[in-house]
Image: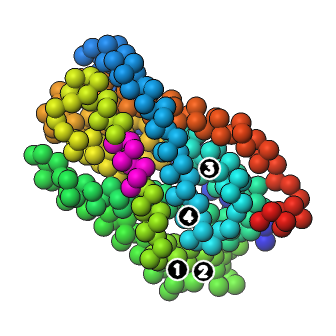
Amino acid sequence: MEGRIRRSIRWAARGANLRVVVASLVALALFGYVVDVASHGDLAGGLGAAIGRVGWVTMLLAVPYFTLRALTWHLLLEQVGVIARLRQTVAAFSAGELTKTLPGGAYLETYVLARLERLTEEGIVNAVVATTGLDVMVGTVSFLTAMAVGLPGRDWFRWLFVAVAAAWIALFALVWVVIRRWRPHERPASPGWVRTVGRVLVEAAYAAARLVRPTVIRPLAATAASLLVYAAVVWLILDAVGIGDIGPEAAIGVVTITSLANALLPIPTELGLTEITGVGVLGAYGVAAPEAAIVMLAYRVLTTGPLTLVILAVIAVLRGAYDPGTSEERAGLS
């Protein structure tokens, strides 16, 4: 059974190679375009002002942001029935956060947790659902906030995101109906890999259903708080580069709409998509494209840099947690 699962995973990984390459090229192209746009303004001066005035603040804010994100994942794991030790959970989450700008990098935390806690097939599937739930939480909070705040002169954007969200919901509903009606995992005549994939999808669907409970308000609240932290960073950057007169709603719009784009659009990396979406949002508030691009590049530097330092510090402190240990030790510490 485990051998069949591993073969299916390897097959899926080989099939995803092209997608990873394409996603990486798209991300680099988008990021390069934003850099080119920023070069038409005072790129060095703007980045210098932002880093000099806001850098120390973002170092402080990186700690609560990381804590809130880790707490969200921990709560989601509990919600789907994955009970893991706190040290191992934080250690695994740190690994995923360190690589989340890479295509599919966030799922490294699921892989690390599965190794550390020796999760069963069901546990791995549930952990994947919890990791995907991070994007669902961000998407939900961002969607509601973006719909409420709006975007000046861009009424169409609401309908665009509603349409994309509806398409995702319809796709998931279709998959669920097909699996429930066809039941490929229960057909002896089906190929082994079809039964394996069907069973995994059913397990994932039941795990996802566990997220639709009243207790989901806890990870939603933690997600909202983490987004507010990054909205504060954007507002500070805007003020540092001399665009602080457009109000905090612009900072909230940048964070929520870029987060919503990352959650809804089928591009498995935040790099590039965040920057170009943020430029568009700031443009709606009247910020010239070069200045908006400088703000978004500063946002990338001042969020990625401090957060990376915090994560590396956490990994150094918890380096002993990366030893899976024996099953007896796990039983005694869980």
Q: Nearer the viewer, mark 3 or mark 1?
A: 3
Residue pointed to by mark 2? 184
Task: Please report whichever mark, 3 or 1, sits nearer to the chain's N-terminal start.
Answer: 3
Residue pointed to by mark 3? 93
Q: CA distance from mark 3 to mark 4?
A: 12 Å
Q: Is residue 57 magenta?
A: no
Question: Residue, x 77% and y 48% (percent of image)?
Answer: 321
**Residue 219, position as x, y percentages in the image:** 47, 63
The magenta-colored residue range is 224-231
Callout 1 touching callout 2 (CB < 8 Å):
yes
Identify the secondary structure beneath mark 1: helix
Residue pointed to by mark 1? 179
Q: CA distance from mark 1 to mark 4?
A: 28 Å
Amino acid found under the numbered disc labelled 4 = Leu
Amino acid found under the numbered disc labelled 2 = Pro
Residue pointed to by mark 4? 75
Task: Please report whichever mark, 3 or 2, sits nearer to the chain's N-terminal start.
Answer: 3
